[in-house]
Amino acid sequence: QVLLVESGGGLVQAGGSLRLSCAASGRSFSRLDMGWFRQAPGKDREFVAAVRWSAGFTRYADSVKGRFTISRDNAKNTVYLQMNSLKPEDTAVYYCAAAATTDVYEYWGQGTQVTVSS
């Protein structure tokens, strides 16, 4: 079992920045792939970014490439999402997720709200 707790959401003006954090406990964090997803009102949950457990390989949704950066600190059991140049369309609840098997995200946090005002 893995417990994930997100933090760092809030209200920011367009063009601003936020850094989300996700603290993990339970299963060995360093062996988990970690991802960030988001869900806007009335829309399906969508993939944002992911980082593999090994070698730090990362991938991003096209909509956030060049603006968002995912990183992890295995010593702190934490994954981060640095979000720059935020746009109103980035407004959503952001969820942290963990996968013991590639692309099978079976553990989810409770979510943190990000609101970008225009």
Image (cartoon, rainbow, N blue to C red):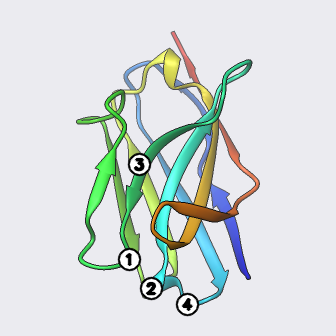
Distance in Å between CA atoms under marks 4 and 2: 6 Å
Q: Residues within 10 Å of mark 1 (few under 14, many from 20)?
A: some
Q: Residues within 10 Å of mark 3 (few under 14, many from 20)?
A: many
Residue position marked by numbered label 4 in the rendering:
28
The image shows residue 12 at horizontal and vertical percentages of: 53, 27
The image shows residue 100 at horizontal and vertical percentages of: 54, 77
Residue position marked by numbered label 1 in the rendering:
53
- In this picture, residue 102 sits left or right of residue 10: left
Residue drawn at (51%, 25%) of the image: 90
Distance in Å between CA atoms under marks 3 and 1: 13 Å
Q: Which tag, 3 or 4, sits closer to the chain's start? A: 4
The three-letter amino acid code for the residue at tag 2 is Ser
Determine whether the residue tagged by mark 1 lies in a helix, strand or loop.
loop
Distance in Å between CA atoms under marks 4 and 1: 10 Å
Residue position marked by numbered label 2 in the rendering:
30
Residue position marked by numbered label 3 in the rendering:
49
Distance in Å between CA atoms under marks 3 and 4: 21 Å
Q: Quadrant of residue 5?
A: bottom right
**Tag 4 near tag 2, CB within 8 Å:** yes
Q: Which mark is residue 101?
A: none
- In this picture, residue 117 sits left or right of residue 63: right
Determine whether the residue tagged by mark 2 lies in a helix, strand or loop.
helix
Determine whether the residue tagged by mark 4 lies in a helix, strand or loop.
loop
Distance in Å between CA atoms under marks 3 and 2: 17 Å
Determine whether the residue tagged by mark 3 lies in a helix, strand or loop.
strand
The three-letter amino acid code for the residue at tag 3 is Ala
